[in-house]
Amino acid sequence: MDTISKLTYRRFLLGQQGLWPGRRFKGPLGAESALRQMEALQLDPLTMVARSQDIAMYGRVLNYKPEHLYKMAYQQRKAFDYGGWLMMYPMNEFPYWRLHMKHRQQRGINYESFKHPPADLVKFVLDELRERGPLGNRDFEGAKVSAWSYRGRKEASIALFYLWLTGEVMISNRKGFDRIYDLRERVLPSEFDYTASESEAEDYLGLKEISFLGLARESTWRTGLSYNIHRDISREEGKQRIERLIEQGLISRVRVENSKDSYLYLNSNQPHLSELEAGRIPKKWKPAGPSTEEEVTLLAPLEIVSARGRAKKVFDFEYLWEVYKPAHLRRWGYYTLPILYGDDLVARLDPKLDRKTNTLQILGFWLEDDAPKDEAFASALANGLHRFADMIGAEKFDLSGIKQTKLRLYLKKKLK
């Protein structure tokens, strides 16, 4: 088994996700390409400064605007929203996710007011969609749920959610972040309206899990596959599947220096790992604009390379999204975002958009102990803040939360 350096590990994860050495996708068409590169994009409704999904896209797509994602997904039908984690996936994957939907239907909803909605309620909801067209939860009347549910206050809302999980309806559009549903056959392009075989779907979604993570820990890979297909997978079955994929020449094992874990990667990515280990950047990763050394990138709070404890493992950078913590327990701030400079996380800031004055407010800013403090970093930070402000439509800056006087004065001068 080959061993790669920690630096190669970090750079591969960033590059495979399209975040390093710079944005390599452009404009409206870039949103679709970026989503394919990412494999999945987690969606979230909070808009303190911008939604997490838009911050994720801004970090990968040159001159990105939030309307690019909506147009790509809900007008051009290039992507669909799905799952308990609420992910967006490329539309061509829908036939494979039908296996997940089938198992959802078999198991029902175990944490709502009913496991399976009554047949007459399902018929009512589908008839309403068929006759009235796309509808949201607010468009339905009817009985309220017996117990509180964050899926909706009415039984029709829970039924809509159930029909969405089982693939009978899809999210046709969104008003703000509210879901607007319609029948599957009126949303899904006809070329994708079929069901992949069980074996095809399991193999596809197993490889997808590795591609999504870049390097997947062998010991936990089956957990991701189990979620993807919505079926429990034993350790023994997981091992057998890994050995079969290795024998088929689709994946390989690798170790990271000073780590006891073994990781899985797609053999199609072997050239990238070899280039990085030799100290070279893969040609296919050439940026379409400034590199992350010339312009920092603010990472989304749900970014796969840094969320859920991964920042500590990959970058030795502690990161916790503190939106759900009481104010007095927050270490940094409500919506703190990591700052990517070059191939490392070197700082964090807590931003807020004042929509009345179109001002990007920096409520707090924290440098890591080993963060660069030279003019090159200050310039890259100014460039990154300028691009971020352009993405969210901010016209002014309030930098009072940056306590480093020299840096704050430099930024003020650059961001006039």
Image (tube, helix red, strand yellow):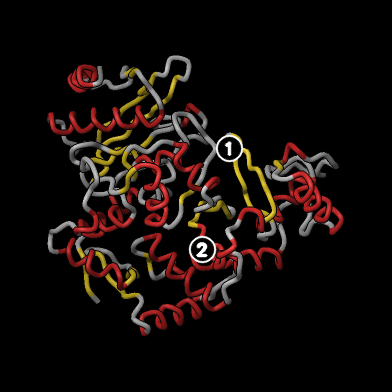
**From the viewer's perspective, is 115 left or right of 44?**
right
Q: Is residue 156 above or below residue 335?
A: below
Closest to the observer, 28 or 142: 28
Quarter where residue 332 is shown: top left
Q: Residues within 10 Å of mark 2 (few under 14, many from 20)?
A: some
Q: Earlier in the sequence, mark 2 or mark 1?
A: 2
Closest to the observer, 320 or 342: 342
Quarter where residue 350 is shown: top left
Q: Secondary structure at mark 1?
A: loop
The residue identified by callout 1 is: 177
Q: Is residue 70 above or below residue 123?
A: above
The quarter of the rendered structure image containing the C terminus is: top left
Query: Which x, y percent locates residue 400?
Result: 32, 17
**From the viewer's perspective, is 113 left or right of 187?**
right
Q: Is residue 267 above or below residue 49?
A: below
**Mark 2: amino acid:** Glu
Q: Residues within 10 Å of mark 1 (few under 14, many from 20)?
A: few
> Which residue appears at 45% of the width and 33% of the height?
50
> Which residue appears at 69% of the width and 44% of the height?
134
Q: Secondary structure at mark 2?
A: helix
Query: Which x, y percent locates residue 218?
Result: 39, 70
The residue identified by callout 2 is: 93
Closest to the observer, 25 or 380: 25
Q: Gap in Å between the C-alphas at discs 2 and 1?
A: 23 Å
Quarter where residue 331 is shown: top left
Query: Which x, y percent locates residue 248?
Result: 37, 83
> Which residue appears at 53% of the width and 72% of the height?
201
> Which residue appears at 76% of the width and 51% of the height?
130
Instruction: Say which of marks 2 and 1 sits in front.
Output: 2
